[in-house]
Image (tube, rainbow, N blue to C red):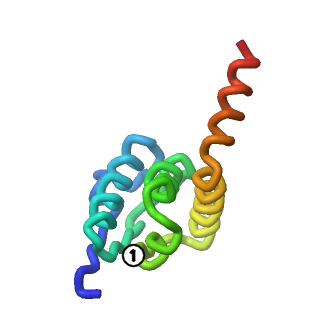
Amino acid sequence: MGDQIKIKVADLIGSPLCISAEDGQKVFDKIEQLLRAGKQVSISFENVSMLISLFLNVAIGQLYGSFSEDEIRTQLKVEGLSSDDMELLKHVVDNAKKYYSNKKSYDDAWLEENNNEE
């Protein structure tokens, strides 16, 4: 466990506001690279003053499309979240697991729904 890398989200994105997909993508790219290298990763939300689900969907939810739940569970730790933000993260993770377990059906339903609106 000596190779644990700590990512301070506020430092990585240069802001205490975790609200944009672009910033979420920066976090995702960093985590993905480290997990692929077999590293243990700790994500710290210390000094973050605002966190929304869009950011978490991109930063963490996307990981479920690249890694198994077991890989994520054993290699990734999250710290520094309030209990409300932990609930938000749990919701994002649950949705990501559902989506990536049946991605084609969700994507097809999304396309069908959007095509019907035209």
Residue 17 coordinates in the image, percent (x, y): 42, 51
Residue 25 coordinates in the image, percent (x, y): 38, 47
- In the foreground, 57 or 33: 33
Residue 56 coordinates in the image, percent (x, y): 50, 54
The structure residue drawn at horizontal position 50% and vertical position 74%, both measured from the top left corner, is: 70
The structure residue drawn at horizontal position 74% and vertical position 17%, both measured from the top left corner, is: 117
Q: Is residue 80 visible?
A: no
Determine whether the residue tagged by mark 1 lies in a helix, strand or loop. Answer: helix
Question: Is 15 rendered above or below residue 106?
Answer: below
The structure residue drawn at horizontal position 28% and vertical position 59%, both measured from the top left corner, is: 33
Image check: 18 left or right of 39? right
Q: Quadrant of the N terminus?
A: bottom left
The image quarter containing residue 28 is: bottom left
The structure residue drawn at horizontal position 28% and vertical position 74%, both measured from the top left corner, is: 39
Image check: 98 left or right of 38? right
Residue 18 coordinates in the image, percent (x, y): 44, 52
Question: Is 6 rendered above or below residue 111?
Answer: below
Question: Is 69 rendered above or below residue 63?
Answer: below
- In the foreground, 65 or 50: 65
Q: State the residue position of label 1.
A: 75
- In the foreground, 33 or 18: 33
Q: Quadrant of the C terminus?
A: top right
- In the foreground, 103 or 13: 103
Amino acid type of the residue that numbered disc 1 sits on in the rendered structure: Gln
Image check: 43 left or right of 84? left
